[in-house]
Image: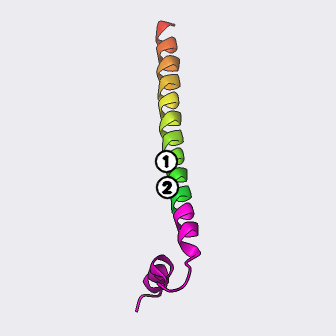
Amino acid sequence: MNTELYIARRLLKGKKNKSNYSRPIVNIAVTGIALGLVVMILAVSILTGFKREIRDKVSGFGSHL
């Protein structure tokens, strides 16, 4: 059996009769990872746009000379 899948299923489902402390922790961790990825993708796209604008301005300035 796949060990990672076994651990993930055990963390997410848990036992019905016991209180499950890991579910909120897993949800917070997944939300944090998703939010971090969104911020990283947004930062890379903004920096790419700035890089393109600066390159266009520098090449446009050189053509007037």
Circle 1 is placed at which residue position? 38
Instruction: Give me the C-alpha separation between circle 1 and circle 2.
Output: 6 Å
The correct choice, above or below, for 41 with respect to 60 in the image is below
Q: Position of residue 62 (x, y in %)?
A: 51, 14
Instruction: Name the one closer to the observer, 15 or 33.
Output: 15
Name the residue furthest bottom: 1
* Residue 18: assigned label: none
Q: Position of residue 47 (x, y in %)?
A: 53, 35
Q: Residues within 10 Å of mark 1 (few under 14, many from 20)?
A: few
Q: Which kind of residue does numbered mark 2 sit on?
A: Ala
The quarter of the image holding the N terminus is bottom left
The correct choice, above or below, for 58 with respect to 22 in the image is above
Q: Residue at x 53, y 23 (%)?
A: 54
Circle 2 is placed at which residue position? 34
Per the rendered image, the range of residues in magenta is 1-29
* Badge 1 vs badge 2, beta-carbon distance below 8 Å: yes
Whether 31 is among the magenta residues is no
Where disc 2 sits, the SS reads helix
Name the residue furthest left: 1
For the image, the number of numbered tags is: 2
Instruction: Name the one closer to the observer, 41 or 56.
Output: 41
Whether 4 is among the magenta residues is yes
Q: Position of residue 33 (x, y in %)?
A: 54, 58
